[in-house]
Amino acid sequence: MVYTRMETKRLVIREFVEEDWMSVHRYASNERVTEHTLWGPNKEEDTKAFIELCLEQQKVEERTEYSLAVEEKDTGILIGGCNIIFMGSNAEIGYCFHPDYWGQGYASEAATAMLKYGFDHPIVHRIYATCRPGNIGSSKVMTRNGMTQEGLLREHVFYKGKYHSSFLFSILKQEYQSLINR
């Protein structure tokens, strides 16, 4: 098993461990956090199952999914999570944070790290992300990271009793490279 770990100016992005479940549950059970997600608000068993899934992903030899814990470097407090899923020449990123850490640039910092991680893989040409139209904060994170809004996926997912639309954002490898070479 290869242990994934990244550091940014303020964050440590690392593999989840079993003991993280309570910290994850603090945000995953929060209705404000899950208002725009395809899951939640979590019950304890949902969060424990998520951590178990993360631990199983870590054992996969040809791994394509990385769900990672995000902790504040100075305090060691787990403040959220982020992920990347590799699908050939494409990858999808996502992120989720405790509301006490919203509006402080942590999601943008984690998304920047995930884009770098994704484009460090030689075959990845495009990285995309989605968010519900009402999730203005997430749209801003993607835009700040150089992602372009490609369009609206109209009512493409059914959850929580109704159909939901999503904005689709992406960035191509050459666009990413021109941003980091500025």
Image (cartoon, grey):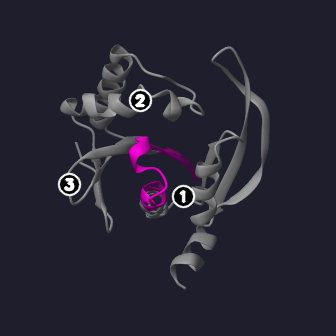
Distance Cα–Cα, label 1 vs label 3: 33 Å
Q: In which image quadrant can residue 49 be found?
A: top left
Mark 1 vs mark 2: in front: 2
Residue 125: image location, x then y, percent: 59, 60
Amino acid type for the residue under numbered disc 1: Val
Q: Quadrant of the N terminus?
A: top left
Residue tagged by mark 1?
Answer: 124
Asked if residue 132 can be seen in this view, the reply is yes
Asked if residue 172 can be seen in this view, the reply is no
The residue that appears at 37% across and 43% down in the rendered structure is 80
The mark nearer the N terminus, 1 or 2, is 2
Q: Secondary structure at mark 1?
A: loop
On screen, residue 75 versus residue 133, left or right, reads left
Residue 93: image location, x then y, percent: 52, 48
Specify the label residue 28 is tagged with.
2
Specify the label residue 75 is tagged with.
3
The residue that appears at 75% across and 29% down in the rendered structure is 156
Amino acid type for the residue under numbered disc 2: Ala
User: Is 90 contained in the magenta span?
Assistant: yes
Amino acid type for the residue under numbered disc 3: Thr
The residue that appears at 76% across and 54% down in the rendered structure is 150
Q: Quadrant of the C terminus?
A: bottom right
Position of residue 140 relative to residue 2, above or below, is below
The mark nearer the N terminus, 1 or 3, is 3
Q: Secondary structure at mark 2?
A: helix
Residue 162: image location, x then y, percent: 72, 18
